[in-house]
Amino acid sequence: MRRGLIARSPVELPDAVLDTRLAKLRTAMAGLDAVMVYTNHTQPAAVSWLTGFVPYWSEALLVVPRARLPVLVVALTFRVKPWIERTSRVAEVIHTPRIGLEAARLVAAAKPDAAVGIVDFDQLGSGIADDLREGGPHLSLSDAGDMFAVLRGSADPAELMLAVRAAAIADRALSVMPPRAAGIGAILGSIEGEARRLGAEEIYLAAAPDLASDTKLRRIEGEPQLGERFALRASVAYKGAWVRRVITVEPGAEQRSERAHAAFAAAAAQLPDASGFAPFKSFLVEGCRTAQPLEALMGSRIDEPRPPAPGAVVSVEAVLAIDEKEILIGAPVLVGAPGSSVTLDFAELFR
C-alpha cells in the first residue's frame, strides 16, 4: 500500500496529453475492438500512463474501447469513487470484487465476439483470466504487451517533466541527510521525510552500510554499523513517474567521485549501446515497458536484454572501481541524449 499523497495535476498531466496517448493506442489497435490493462500498486504504470490513475492498493482493469473513453473496473469499495474520479480521466468507474468478470461483460455487451488485446495477458492472475472467459465466453483474447511497449518506447514531454521532478526530489532528499554519527536509521528517516515533504507519492530506500565489506544494496532493518564508505539508493515516484538515484558517501574523496560521475555519464550517453559499461564491474538498466515502473531491461546479469528505445527515460545503476575503491552510482537517463543524460544535467533539457 502506498503511503504518500496521490493527486492529479491538470498542469503537469493535462487531459490533452492523456487524449493523445489514447489516440496512439487506438491507432495501434489494428484488428482489436478493445484493449484491457491490469493495474495494482506494484504494476501501476500502464494504466497511470493512459488515465493518471495510481492505486493505493487493491487492483483494477482498464477497458479501452475503440471509440469511447476508458472505463475503470476496480476491486475497491464505492467510498473511494470520488477520489478515483478526481485523479483519473475515465468515462466511468465500476466497483466489483470480480474485475475480470465485469470487464468482459462490458465488452461482450457491445460485441459478444469482440477481439480483445490484454496487456501482459500471460502475467495476469489465473482467477482474473478465468473470470474474463466466464464473462465473455465468445471473446477472442490475445496478448497486447508488445504492442503497448512500442507505444511507451519514447517518453513524451509530460512524462519527461514528471521524471525530472521525481529526480529532483530524490536529489534533494539525499542531499539533506544528517551526519554519519546520527546512524543509518536517522539518515534514512531524514531522506524519506524530505522526499515526502516535497511531494513524493512513494519512496523506497536501500543501503550498503559498509562498502569495504559488501556492495549489495538492501532494505535496512535494525541499526547496522556504518563504515567509512557507504552507499544509498532512493527509488522515488512522483505522479506515476519512477526514478532511482544511487550515491556513494565518502568524505574527502571529491576527485574520485568526479571521475566516477564522468565515467558513468560517458557510458550512459551511449545507451542503448551498452559497450560503454564494459569497464564497469556491473550495471543495470531499468525502465517501463508496460506495467512495471522499473523493469530490468539490460545489464551485466541480464541474459535476454530488451534495449530501451531512443527517447526513453530509464534508471541506470552501476558499480565501478577507482583507485581500488568500489563506487556505486545511479541516475535517471534519457536514452539517446548525449550530454544531458544523468540527473545532474536533466534540467538542461527544459531551460
Image (cartoon, rainbow, N blue to C red):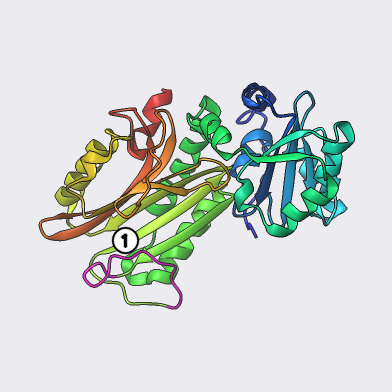
Visible in this render: residue 39? yes
Image x and y of residue 219, in percent = 44, 67
Image x and y of residue 52, in percent = 67, 37
Name the amino acid, label 1. Ala
Q: Residues within 10 Å of mark 1 (few under 14, many from 20)?
A: many
Visible in this render: residue 99? no
Image x and y of residue 259, in percent = 16, 45
- Residue 191 in the figure: left or right of residue 198: left
* Location of mark 1 (residue): 231
**Stretch of the chain drawn in magenta:** 210-222
- Figure check: 74 above or below 17: below
User: Which one is nearer the viewer's eye here, 108 or 287?
Assistant: 108
- Residue 12 in the figure: left or right of residue 312: right
Image x and y of residue 220, in percent = 43, 71
Q: Which residue is drawn at 45% across and 58% down?
A: 191
Majority secondary structure of magenta residues: loop
Q: Residue at x 43, y 24 (%)?
A: 350
Q: Which residue is drawn at 54% across and 48% down?
A: 292
